[in-house]
Image (tube, grey):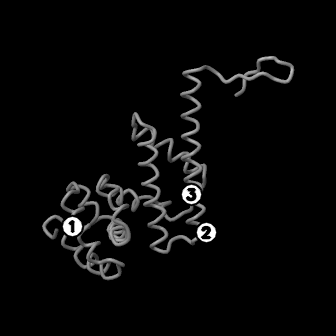
Amino acid sequence: MAARLAPDLAGPVASLLAHSPDPDGALNLLERYVQGAPAEVLDDLARYPTALTYLVAIFGYSTFLAESFFADPSLPVQFARDRKFTKLKSREELMQDYARFSTTHPDPWLSAQLARFKRRNYLRIVLKDVLGLSTLGETTLELSMLADVMLWNALIFCDQELEKRYGQPQYRDAQGRIVRSG
């Protein structure tokens, strides 16, 4: 790990690991991350030391969520660059985030796209929680809003697919007339 990571990060890594709930597990996952991450991402860790804090925090708390950093090694740096990272995201902001995410990360399967979006936001929310950047109320509110956004986007997708297949929804009113809904 020392060969690939900037030498000036050795001190911060040791300090972060000392405060981790699972220092050994976090170190193992950090070594795995450093071995698999592209060189430019590792260079960015030196420029954005907060990203290293995010890595060790997740690695010390959740192997499951750590897999997201292995799948997208630039994610901790993206979080560190985000000036609004510590702020509570509204439902509207999450909807906008999903719209951007869906265009920059296209996937033929909506379920896979939603799963990646959810995991990325779980990481963000968990990081804010474990680092003490959000209260319990804010954490649960953000999780709830994330669930709303995901369900809404799944519903919209299903509505669009059904309308493509069967046309615009119709029903009969009390007088027996066909009425279009929507």
Give the quarter of the figure containing the N terminus: bottom left
Q: From what the image shows, is residue 38 above or below residue 165?
A: below
Tell me residue 162's x, y (percent).
57, 27
Residue 49 appears left or right of 157: left
Q: Amino acid at mark 1?
A: Glu
Residue underneath mark 1: 31
Residue underneath mark 3: 89
| Real-space Cα separation, disc 3 to disc 2, in angstroms | 13 Å
Mark 2 neighbour density, 10 Å: few (under 14) some (14–19) many (20 or more)? few
Q: Amino acid at mark 3?
A: Lys
Residues under numbered marks 3 and 2 in contact, where contact means CB atoms less than 8 Å apart? no
Mark 3 residue element: loop
Q: From what the image shows, is residue 168 above or below residue 46?
A: above
Q: Residue at x 26, y 79 (%)?
A: 14
Residue 84 appears left or right of 109: right
Mark 2 residue element: helix
- Numbered badge on residue 137: 2
